[in-house]
Image (cartoon, grey):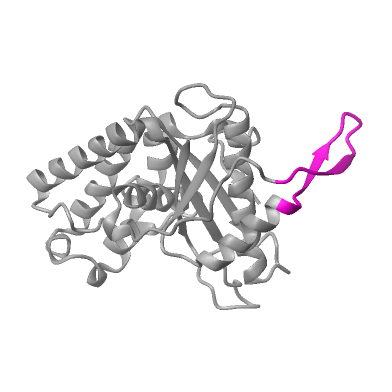
Amino acid sequence: MDLMYVDESGDTGLIPPAGQSPTRYFCLTGLVVHELRWAETHAALLDFRRRIKRKYKVYLDDEIHAGDMLNKPSRIPKKLQQLRKYQRLAIIRHQADAIARLPAIRLVNVVFDKEAAKDTDPESVFQRTWYALFQRFENTILHQNFPGPPNDQERGIIFPDQTDGPRLRKFLNAMRIQNHLFIKRNDGQHSIIDEPIRLLIEDPVCRDSRHSYFIQAVDGAVFLLKQHIQPSGFCKKHGANAYFSKRLKPVLCLPASHKDPFGVVHL
């Protein structure tokens, strides 16, 4: 069984002039680990937290939320608030390096460009991005491109951060009944085929990031994906816009998209 922990960055709202969203991109990242590698991977994430505790005096149960650590420090635990901003960025960097050393995981990344799709409403942004992530998870399991024991009967289950569970359940159930895919033929034209999702089982199981090192890890990864495509001034000044492409590169799921050098699916 492949387990995929998911978090998002950005929002689905419309950008000016049609809306008020400050972000051009809506991003999803899924951290995939096989059930037989879960315990050792969790142990490695716990070891990272112990190192952070020794170095920065951050409690093991303090939530590391990358976006808030740099942009909204009033929301983070007091121990983290007491650190300088460059120290909080260093924790994000150390977390990226810890993730990159996990041999049993892969990161699946999807980005929706709202500026390129000017007539797309927020519901469509949310749906199309999640559909793409579900589809890439299914395809990568089908082609056995995730680390783990080879098994042609593999299945997957999804653990999102606290988000709209009923909508995700509706999306996945709909894809199990009907799932239209656009296939490019040898003559350059496209055909539409119906391939319902069959390898993703159960409803998405929402997790509270405060209680999951896996969700906190993927939160850091999707934050760095966002900085990769649309960096803040602070991250660009300190080189954090390159953490995704350089530090996380060993665990990026490259087969998810052959059109992007880092496997990112662009919509």
Nearest the viewer among 95 and 135 is 135
- Residue 148, visible in the rendered structure: yes
Q: Residue at x 23, y 36 (%)?
A: 43
- Residue furthest to the top in view is 150
Q: Residue at x 13, y 43 (%)?
A: 50
- From the viewer's perspective, is residue 158 above or below residue 114? above
Nearest the viewer among 67 and 197 is 197
Question: Where residue 47 sits in the image (x, y, percent)?
Answer: 18, 38
Q: Which residues are magenta?
A: 177-196
- Residue 114, visible in the rendered structure: no
Find residue 141 and report its image quarter. top right
Question: Where residue 124 sits in the image (x, y, percent)?
Answer: 67, 65
Is 192 contained in the magenta span?
yes
Q: Residue at x 46, y 65 (%)?
A: 163
Question: Where residue 200 sits in the image (x, y, percent)?
Answer: 58, 44
Is 159 contained in the magenta span?
no
Number of marks in the rendered image: 0
Q: Is residue 41 left or right of residue 18?
A: left
Nearest the viewer among 103 and 244 is 103
Q: Residue at x 21, y 41 (%)?
A: 46
Question: Where residue 231 sits in the image (x, y, percent)?
Answer: 44, 54
- From the viewer's perspective, is residue 95 above or below residue 115? above
